[in-house]
């Protein structure tokens, strides 16, 4: 579509070392490139002089991740990407490809209005009971055997529900379910999420639930993540 344009690329494959990264950034600074195509690496604080147009493709990919922080991360990414345009006094232009142009993460990022995003996001989290209005504990079971890992996750979730019946309904038990990344490094992964008004209530429920469930079977390990930064 753009014959004769000098094209550069910036991603982990094209810039797998600091020297390669510096080479690409230097080419941009020297105006040796007309177009640069890349991943999120382009947005991470790099000063790219002379960029007048930024195109962000498939913004919905970040919005649709199965994590309650998806909108927050999409907003940050869009804001950072948009900030690459017009950094030397000249007006820049930003075009976002999205199937949800009215999403508050998109509209607030393009309007440079963090207050609107903050208020909307807080209201959604309040309605759904996510931080900062609740504490989360992620329980990830990992094992080389898919069947054993799934069985251990179901047994632990059932034990947590029995513990919840004894200790009261303050803590919600969500799951078990296969992790969005169901297998990594040769190990199958299942998730359980505890949603609690306080960290101590979640800890007490987990302690009782683990006692009722007993230790996980051989080859399966339980990883407890308090206030997880990612649910993936």
Image: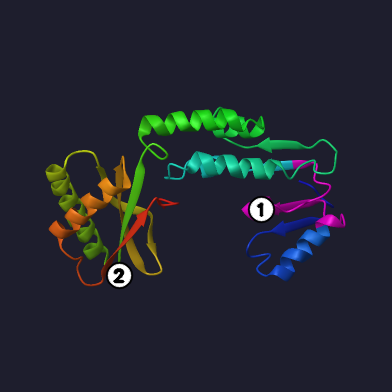
32 within the magenta span: yes
- Residue 11 is situated, as x and y percent measured from the top left of the image, at 65, 59
The residue sitting at 59% across, 43% down in the picture is 76
In terms of image quadrants, where is residue 9? bottom right
Closer to us: mark 1 or mark 2? 1
SS category of the residue bearing label 2: loop
Left or right of 214? Residue 6 is right
The residue sitting at 25% across, 62% down in the picture is 149
Rendered image: mark on residue 144:
2
Residue closest to the eye, 116 or 17? 116
Crowd rating for badge 2 (residues with CA inside 10 Å; few <14, some 14–19, many 20+):
some
Badge 1 or badge 2: first in the primary sequence: 1
- Report which residue position mark 1 lands on: 44
The residue sitting at 77% across, 62% down in the picture is 24
102 within the magenta span: no
- Residue 200 is situated, as x and y percent measured from the top left of the image, at 28, 48
In terms of image quadrants, where is residue 220? bottom left
In terms of image quadrants, where is residue 217? bottom left
Figure disc tally: 2
First to last magenta residue range? 28-53
- Residue 1 is situated, as x and y percent measured from the top left of the image, at 76, 46
- Residue 90 is situated, as x and y percent measured from the top left of the image, at 85, 38
Crowd rating for badge 1 (residues with CA inside 10 Å; few <14, some 14–19, many 20+):
few
Residue closest to the eye, 72 or 189? 72
């Amino acid at each position: 579509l753009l014959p004769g344009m000098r094209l550069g690329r910036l991603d982990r494959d094209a810039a797998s070392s600091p020297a390669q990264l510096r080479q690409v950034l230097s080419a941009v600074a020297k105006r040796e490139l007309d177009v640069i195509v890349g991943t999120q690496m382009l947005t991470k604080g790099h000063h790219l002089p002379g960029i007048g147009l930024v195109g962000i493709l498939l913004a919905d990919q970040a919005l649709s991740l199965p994590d309650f922080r998806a909108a927050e991360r999409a907003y940050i990414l869009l804001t950072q990407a948009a900030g690459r345009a017009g950094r030397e006094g000249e007006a820049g232009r930003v075009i976002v490809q999205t199937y949800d142009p009215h999403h508050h993460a998109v509209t607030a990022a393009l309007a440079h209005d963090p207050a609107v995003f903050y208020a909307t996001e807080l209201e959604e989290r309040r309605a759904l009971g996510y931080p900062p209005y609740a504490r989360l504990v992620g329980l990830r079971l990992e094992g080389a055997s898919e069947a054993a890992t799934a069985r251990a996750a179901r047994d632990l979730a059932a034990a947590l529900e029995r513990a919840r019946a004894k200790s009261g309904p303050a803590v919600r038990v969500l799951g078990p379910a296969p992790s969005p990344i169901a297998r990594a490094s040769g190990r199958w992964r299942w998730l359980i999420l505890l949603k609690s008004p306080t960290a101590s209530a979640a800890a007490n429920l987990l302690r009782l639930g683990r006692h009722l469930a007993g230790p996980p079977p051989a080859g399966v390990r339980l990883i407890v993540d308090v206030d997880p930064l990612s649910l993936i």
